[in-house]
Amino acid sequence: MRKITLLSATLLLAVSAAQAQVDTVRATTLPPAQLAEKLYNSGVAKYNQKSYRAALQDFDRALAAKPDFAKAYYNRAAVRYELKDYQPAIQDYDQAIKLDPNTFGSYFGRGQVREALKQTAEAEQDYGKATELKTDYAPAWYYRGALRFEKAEYAAAKADFDAAIKADPTYAYAWHDRGSTQRQLNNLPAAIQDYSQALKLQPELLPALLNRAATRRRSGDLKGALQDYNDYLAKKQDNALAYTNRGSTRYEQGDYKGAVEDFGRAVVLDAGYAFAWNNRAAAYLKLEDYKRAEADASKAISLNAQYAEAYLNRGHAREMLRLPDAACQDWRKAAELGLEIGNTHAANAGCGAE
Amino acid sequence: MHKYLLAFLLLSATAASAQNVEFSKDQFGNDKDGLKTALKEIKAGDEFYDLDPPRYEQALPHYLAAQKFNPNNAQLNLKIGESYLHSGFKPRALEYLQKAYQLNPDVDPRIHYLLGRGLHLNAKWDQAIAEYKRATPAAGTKNTAAFTQDIQKKIRECENGRKLAAKPSRVFIDNAGPGVNSAYADYGPVITADESVILFTSRRDNSTGGQKDPETGGFFEDVYQSTRTGKGEWSPARNLGEPVNTDGHDATVGLAPDGQRLLVYLEENGGDLNEANLRGAEWRKPQKLGSRINSKAHESSAAYTPDGRSLYFVTDKEGGQGGRDIYKVELEGRGPAVNLGSVINTQYGEEGVFLHPDGKTMYFSSEGHNSMGGYDIFKSVYQNGKWSAPENLGWPINTPDDDVFFVISASGRHGYYSSFRDDGLGSKDIYQITFLGPEKPPMLSQEDQLLASRVQPVKETLLAPPVAIASAQVTILKGVVTEEASKQPTEATIDVIDNSLNQIIASFQSNAQSGRYLVSLPSGVNYGIVVRKEGYLFHSENFDLPAGAAYSEVVKDIALKKLDVGVKVVLNNIFFDTGKATLRKESTGELERLQKLLAETPALRLEISGHTDNVGKAEFNKDLSQRRAQAVVDYLVTKGIDKARLTSFGYADTQPVATNTTATGRQLNRRTEFKVTGK
């Protein structure tokens, strides 16, 4: 979370700072009596010092002095975004666009605010407008791509990430997210390549290791997947998700004891992580330790009462524990929650007929 | 320090590899009485052991008594081991045989063969193979070729066992409990298709006549019956008594799916098969099954087909594939019994045949095919005019010892057989096998943070591919037939009809006392079920079971009505084309029954009525129901029934018998009916 906020702020600042510098240069060429511009420049300086409240006051005063000062609106919007004062930020961007409709930065900035307000359709439109006005501005492509990815429009997302990479071939996030898009499109080798490129550009982009691992695993390269998980866990040991996913890989390799260990570490790190409890139940089933399997699946269900997979697994455990009625109940509940195979198990085990 | 330790270890090792100790005064001079008793026990044991054929089970307790006195005699250990090899607890032989060999490697020229047997019966496949390879024929063996063949077969069995045990079948094997099992041998279970009744053979102490078999020392066999209680347990078994049980051996070998006919083995004429019928609550005296089945050879087990018209049975008469073979005979025909051929029968023995109520799946035991030792249970399916290659039911159902007389419920969920197991109540016990089917794959969940700029991970469920589910393709229809007026159970005939062929496939009787009936309906047929009894109106049901329809159990209690004015009967086997009044040819049987009823009862007058559900326009439904009723009347008139005796009426949806809000209800409402208007 911190990383993303930082990134957004950096991008925004990059845009704002670029504008501010130009203005500063311009200001030196202008007559000294221009009060609004002076206040504006002071605001930019305070923004750069992260003195947002003070910057806000400067931009307010600059606009009071010069109500058609488009760049002051633009920068005040940026300050308000930092202060999470989103609605006024949007009003400022609206005003900046009204005064200067051809500045891509206002659209991009408004897109960011709208995304923060979860107005994703509007945000997507704003990013789109930004890409039209400045086709080589990689972040606009990138952010629209991410929104499209979240809507599961993978082909459109991929086109955006392609454009982002074209605009900025060193953009590690764009490589990474295109990798994820390729993965969703089932182009697994291409996904692995993209994740690798992201890692090459930014070795500390650790999620890329996890995602490459998951993709390698899906493509049947369990050894490669395990190596990636190991590399990740050598650097970072506080991620329950990473242990859970390595555990799943070990499970697929038939290393059920190793899987139990990993899922165990995950629940120590995050006792509320239902997936880890469920997966450990699955591994215990394989180890024919049905009591522990039942206990773990029950824990997963206590964390998420709608967890279909956990009901299914607990059904299996209960069947083997000679609790046929309870097993039938669990399988049927799993089916009710969307896992149709639960009904098949129930029918096959003679549920209801005994 | 180390030196002392080494000396101690050597001493311990020497003590472990004990020397052979003879039963002699030199060894036991201080305990003359003990020695005398031990020698007496050995002598008593030898009297059984040296018989031809030896009676190992009777020798064994004597040898074990002597063993307590001196456990380190190679010969005695060998004899105990060999006796165990011929007992119910064969795996126990190994420890004695190994000890005999350890005490004296030259204890017996057959030692490697016997060790091979002991290891084989303990499922130690590789070690058994090694011993079999070292085995040599005993001095004086005339037929060394037969010995070599036997060794080769046993090695193959071990190889089969290794493969089968590597992939065990997923089953629970549970003792059938004290209702069924006793401290004596209990075996040969047979069940009704719905598992409500079990009959079996037992050699317990309340056998009819109460005498013991001089050959084995055990009580004579009798047939016992138990029923399943509401809690799923078996009620205390009761001896079927006379006339099924006699003073001699009486053993169950088969039961019709509805439990109304029992096949009994009697030791007459070299071993013959007999059939006993249930009348009310009493079994009638077993009757011989006739010369097309019984011969001077040994007929040992049999099973009815679900329609009751054919019998599969086992005989070792000459002319087969070798050993005991399975044959099939049409009970109502005159043709000879037919050997099932080399796909099923091998040069070795086949035994314990059972036919699943689906009519096409056969279970039997064989010493051939890929048996892992002795008889193993196999399954074969009759498809496209031939039996499929028998499939071994696998470990742990099958063991290196004999696994015979296996039966399975119609649902395919439970099997029953007898076995010697450590959790038994004494001697051989009956066990219930619960088939768990293929392993149910557990499901893992996983998520990944797929977008670098987002925190929310994306969930991904890792789903293993679906597994093939084998389900029995048969419907069990059962219930109670009563007289509507008196509400009393009654005996009636139940005809099972293939509507497309208009042929009676099978006829059964409901039980005279309980009114219970049960019919097996293998999937793939449009069945008409007609329940009839003289003096009553017939009752018809329809079960259209497409090929592949999964197992189901339908309970249908039927009340037969007397022929009285005002009585209504639904004609469930009259079919029309959708939206039309054209009688389909599958209706012929039902129409003929109706015509016969009218012909046999000249004063009978009927109103034939058509009924619809409430779907569609009322006018259309009214017209359709009227035309359909009239179509039935027209048919009857063309068959010679005076049209003055018949009226037709279309009621549309005005007389529903069920709700119109469900599909099942609407189906019940769409019907053709008749009402007695005069008699």
Image (cartoon, grey):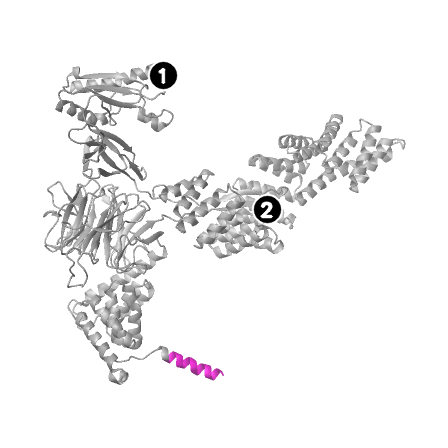
Q: For this rendering, which residue is in front, A103 or B601? A: B601
Q: Give above or below for B456 relative to B203.
A: above
Q: Position of residue B237 (x, y in %)?
A: 24, 51
Instruction: Kindly state the secondary structure of the residue where label 2 is placed.
Output: helix
The amino acid beneath tag 1 is Lys
Q: Secondary structure at mark 1?
A: loop
Front-most of residues B155 and B178: B178
- What residue is pinned by disc 2? A195
| Residue B592 visible in the picture | yes
Magenta-drawn stretch, dominant element (helix, strand or loop): helix
* Residue range (magenta): B1-14
Q: Hey, what amino acid is under mark 2?
A: Tyr
Quadrant of the rendering where the C terminus of chain A is positioned: top left
Q: Is residue B7 magenta?
A: yes
Q: Residue at label 1? A: B617
Question: Badge 1: how crowded within 10 Å, few (<14), some, or many (20+)?
Answer: few
